[in-house]
Amino acid sequence: MPRRSYDQYCAIARALDAVGDRWTLLIVRELLGGSRRYTDLHADLPGVSTDMLASRLKDMEREDLLTRRRLPPPGAASVYELTPRGRALLPALTALADWGAPALDEQRPTDAVRAHWFAVPLMARLARHFAGEPERVIGIALDEGAFHIVLDPDDVAAARYADGPAARPDTVLRMDTATCAALAHDRFSLAEGLAAGWIEQARPDERTADPAAV
């Protein structure tokens, strides 16, 4: 069954034909961190029903936003990953995060949170801070979990992130969720956060055997 269209000869309308449905852009947010299994997506999209998620994934595959592939044995599971067209939505999600930041004040009791949800807006902040420096793999450690950002020295816009700790980070930044939200949304710089003691920075030779530090 074809998806509904605004039937308007307008680039904004065409874009919303493809990504304007509920949950679609949040699925893109999840897949910007790399390929994910259906169960992983469902776990990190609290509130979405299984039927809705399956329907959105099919729609996005038809729109060439993502592809599904089967992992070789012993994995024997299907994973979803963004196409180049899907990854090209990163600037749009960054702009949406910046636009929505004023509404992100104190966390409400009903708010779910995942550490990697801060990655998209944080990539631009860290690329700016570490410009011209040797750090390329930046680990982020929160109480809710860890993720890491990989910077491209030749292209600020080519930064990417992945869920979980990095195997060999150049540096690890530890902070609480409120601090990460404020940093991600440019309420203060990384340098200011470090100077104030809100953020702890550990380089590889300073880390302990704590698994969350790698």
Image: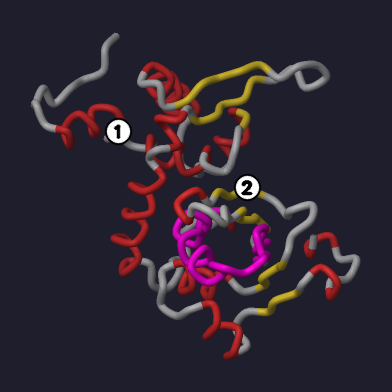
**Could you tell whether 139 is left or right of 187 in the image?**
right
Going by the numbered disc 1, the residue's amino acid type is Asp
Q: Is residue 198 above or below residue 28?
A: below
Give the Cα separation between the discs numbered 2 and 1.
25 Å
Residue 1: give its label. Answer: none
Locate residue 136, reporting x and y percent.
Answer: 65, 59
Locate residue 57, reporting x and y percent.
Answer: 45, 24
- Quadrant of the drawing holding the N terminus: top left
Task: Kindly tell me whether residue 96 is visible in this rendering.
Answer: yes
**Could you tell whether 100 is left or right of 138 in the image?**
left
Residue range in magenta is 116-142
Q: Depth check: give the residue in front, 166 or 151.
A: 151
* Residue occupying the far left of the picture: 8
Q: Secondary structure at mark 1?
A: loop
Colouring scheme, one of rainbow, by chain, secondary structure, one colour: secondary structure
Q: Secondary structure at mark 2?
A: strand
**Could you tell whether 201 is left or right of 35 in the image?**
right
Membership of 78 in magenta stretch: no
Going by the numbered disc 2, the residue's amino acid type is Ala
Residue 162: give its label. Answer: 2
Front tag of 2 and 1: 2
Q: Is residue 206 above or below residue 197?
A: above
* Residue occupying the far bottom of the picture: 196
Are dots 2 and 1 in contact, CB under 8 Å? no
Task: Kindly tell me whether residue 145 is visible in this rendering.
Answer: no
Q: Report crowding for label 2: few under 14, some 14 to 19, many 20 or more residues within 10 A (C-alpha).
A: many
Q: Depth check: give the residue in front, 136 or 188.
A: 136
Residue to which mark 1 is pinned: 21
Which residue is painted at 50% across and 62% down in the image? 122
Which residue is painted at 55% across and 48% down in the image? 160
